[in-house]
Image: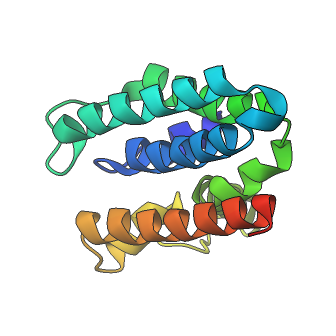
Amino acid sequence: SNAVNITDGLDGLAGGLSALAFMAYGVIAWGTTWLSGYQDIAIFSFVLVGSLIGFLFFNAYPAKIFMGDTGSLALGGFVVGMAYMLQIPLFILIVGFIYLIEVISVILQVGYFKLTHGKRIFRMAPIHHHFELGGWSEKKVVAVFSIVTICMCVVGVIGLFGV
């Protein structure tokens, strides 16, 4: 849950990635409805996607509204909870790949900083700020991270359904 909070540092990043994850969950729940009765989860997933799209209208660069800790922690809880309700908890590692990378970058940066008494691996952690300090625009970071998440969601859904 906190991984989404860590990711929430650029306009539209956490909301956009969460919308993509919920879209993947919705497709999975909808595709398995005839087997296991996940209609409610599919509907809830798509409702979250719709609400996040509405939010992103105001949160995309330049943001006029910010999510804050309450929103990002709730989204993280929904990402995890939905995976457990669908009985695919390891799927979080696929659809939440960027969340995982963000958290690992913070853990590595803090650990290395403490071990070396002030040296750093990244320019700044979490890693989305590292790319910004490397010259990427905020829009480019969000776009690249979103494309990676789309690819991971497609891979996960295809892998799950065996298409």
In the rendered image, the vertical position of residue 41 relative to residue 96, given as above or below: above
Q: Which quadrant of the figure contains the C terminus?
A: bottom right
Residue 63 percent coordinates (x, y): 18, 41
The residue located at (34%, 67%) in the rendering is: 143
Residue 69 percent coordinates (x, y): 46, 25
Using residue 139 as the reference point, say whether residue 124 is left or right of it: right
Toward the viewer: 143 or 7? 143
Single out the residue that lies furthest toward the front: 34
The residue located at (33%, 51%) in the rendering is: 10
The residue located at (67%, 69%) in the rendering is: 155
Using residue 97 as the reference point, say whether residue 32 is left or right of it: right
In the rendered image, the vertical position of residue 76 relative to residue 145, given as above or below: above
Toward the viewer: 6 or 59? 59
Single out the residue that lies furthest toward the bottom: 135
Total numbered labels placed on residues in the image: 0
User: Which picture quadrant has residue 87?
Assistant: top right
Give the colour scheme shown: rainbow
Toward the viewer: 61 or 47? 47
The residue located at (24%, 71%) in the rendering is: 137
Residue 77 percent coordinates (x, y): 64, 27
Question: Can residue 83 be seen at all in this image of the molecule?
Answer: no
Toward the viewer: 78 or 155? 155
Using residue 88 as the reference point, say whether residue 74 is left or right of it: left
Using residue 51 as the reference point, say whether residue 128 is left or right of it: right
Residue 142 percent coordinates (x, y): 35, 62
Question: Can residue 122 be seen at all in this image of the molecule?
Answer: yes
Q: Which quadrant of the figure contains the N terminus?
A: top right
